[in-house]
């Protein structure tokens, strides 16, 4: 988020790798509500979601919400299996492998992921989220 002319954006306090990984938990908790608005609210004002089960990039609140209306029908809950964290001023990235258990069917889906978070209005929001099912 850009600061107004003549103002500087305060840098976020340094985060540990564990705190960056914990941001996934906020998103996963939003999934557990089964409310697409709560999930979409985790994304930044200028997001990009490249979802697992859609060919369409989602780049605004409405299209992200629309994706999760369908995805949440499966009652997904995720767990991170491997995580690699990178951090910078007012941004951080967590990428790796996660696995979802679909509560509606019991199916498990393993996927590669990346989350790029930005500090926006004092909250960590998802600016970029890519998820792709493992090829094997």
Image (cartoon, rainbow, N blue to C red):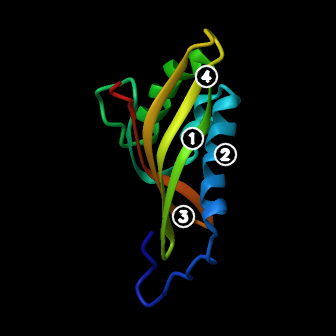
Question: Looking at the image, is mark 1 or mark 2 nearer the viewer?
Answer: 1
Indicate which disc, 4 or 1, sits on the residue closer to the N terminus.
1
Give percent across and percent down for residue 12: 59, 76
Q: Residue at x 48, y 76 (%)?
A: 89
- State left or right for residue 103 relative to residue 59: right
Q: Residue at x 49, y 86 (%)?
A: 8
Question: Looking at the image, is mark 4 or mark 3 nearer the viewer?
Answer: 4
Indicate which disc, 1 or 2, sits on the residue closer to the N terminus.
2
* Residue, disc 2: 25
- State left or right for residue 49 relative to residue 77: left
Question: Looking at the image, is mark 2 or mark 3 nearer the viewer?
Answer: 2
Q: Residue at x 58, y 66 (%)?
A: 121
Question: Looking at the image, is mark 2 or mark 4 nearer the viewer?
Answer: 4
Which residue occupies the extreme top position in the image? Answer: 105
Circle 3 — which element?
Answer: strand
Of the 4 image quadrants, the one containing the C terminus is: top left
Circle 4 — which element?
Answer: strand
* Residue, disc 4: 101
């Amino acid at each position: 988020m850009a600061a107004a002319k003549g103002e500087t954006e305060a840098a976020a306090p340094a985060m540990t790798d564990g705190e960056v990984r914990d941001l996934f938990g906020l998103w996963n908790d939003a999934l557990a509500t089964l409310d697409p608005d709560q999930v979409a609210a985790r994304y930044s004002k200028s997001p990009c979601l490249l979802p697992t089960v859609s060919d369409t990039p989602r780049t605004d609140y409405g299209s992200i919400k629309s994706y999760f209306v369908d995805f949440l029908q499966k009652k997904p809950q995720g767990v991170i299996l491997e995580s690699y964290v990178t951090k910078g001023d007012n941004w951080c990235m967590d990428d790796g492998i996660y696995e979802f258990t679909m509560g509606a069917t019991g199916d498990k889906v393993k996927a590669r992921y990346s989350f790029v978070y930005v500090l926006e209005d004092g909250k960590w929001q998802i600016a970029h989220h890519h998820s792709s099912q493992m090829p094997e």
